Image (cartoon, rainbow, N blue to C red):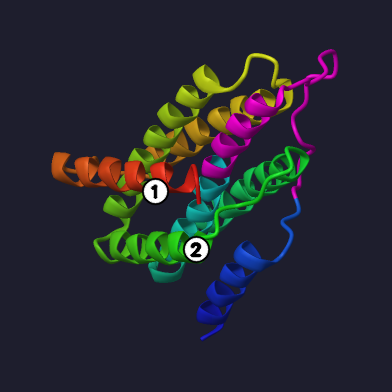
Amino acid sequence: MDRLLGAADSALKTLFAKPRAMRPCPVVPADETRLAANERRHAAALMRVNHVGEVCAQALYTAQALVTGDAVLRQHFEKAAEEETDHLAWTAERLAELGDRPSLLNPLWYAGAFGLGLLAGRLGDALSLGFVVETEKQVEAHLQSHLDRLPAGDHASRAIVVQMKEDEAAHAAQALQAGAMELPAPAKAFMRAAAKVMTATAHYI
């Protein structure tokens, strides 16, 4: 019951409370961000997609922590969720700076990701960790694509995305060290397809 209440509390905080980062937001002090109106809109759309990704990360890790029977692994998932809170806070702050809003469908994204996390956890700890590895690899590639698409002068957004990319790679490496099993190809393909739907929708809504 305590873990269920904790999961519910995490969902409410992720969706409705202002996230608080443990680390300062990455910046490039020597460079000032100056964007034209069209560049600002484009950057905001990309950062909204990144914010959705962090909402989903909170849901995934919370669900996986809820169902694992391994206390050490539960701590691993909970720590990863705490680290991802920094990303959630940074992307939310950057969206506000760009004069835009998070996705209106965040409750839907959270629910879907939470369900996937529960399913992965029920398949066993090794596959659950494998799900983390594949998720983080896909997110890392996605963030690289955003670095290629963000306006060259948007130093603030780019600094955030660079740090996020490094952190996601570290989470994948940690999951591998913890005993992750590689997912079958159909599962990877399904995850890529679901991610494309989410990112394409969150870009606008």
Q: Quadrant of residue 183?
A: top left
Q: Residue at x 70, y 15 (%)?
A: 153
C-beta proximity under 8 Å, tags 1 and 2 = no
Q: Which residues are magenta?
A: 21-49
Residue 198 is marked as 1
Q: Residue at x 71, y 65 (%)?
A: 17
Q: Nearer the viewer, residue 138 or 148?
A: 148
Q: Which residue is mark 2?
A: 62
Q: Residue at x 55, y 35 (%)?
A: 46
**Farthest-out residue, front:** 37
Q: Is residue 179 visible?
A: no
| Percent of width and height locating residue 76 | 51, 53
Report if residue 197 lies within the magenta region.
no
Q: Nearer the viewer, residue 191 or 40?
A: 40
Q: Above or below — where is 163 with respect to 186?
A: above
| Percent of width and height locating residue 193 | 26, 43
Determine the secondary structure under disc 2. Answer: helix
Q: Is residue 6 visible?
A: yes
- In the visual, does 44 lie left or right of 123? right
Report if residue 29 lies within the magenta region.
yes
Neighbour tally class for label 1: few under 14, some 14-19, many 20 plus, Cα within 10 Å: some
| Percent of width and height locating residue 191 | 28, 45
Q: Amino acid at mark 1?
A: Met
Neighbour tally class for label 2: few under 14, some 14-19, many 20 plus, Cα within 10 Å: many
Q: Amino acid at mark 2?
A: Thr
| Percent of width and height locating residue 148 | 50, 17
- Distance from disc 1 to disc 2, alpha carbons, whole Å, reads 19 Å
Mark 1 or mark 2, earlier in chain = 2
Q: Above or below — where is 98 with respect to 115?
A: above
Q: Nearer the viewer, residue 168 or 157?
A: 157
Determine the secondary structure under disc 1. Answer: helix
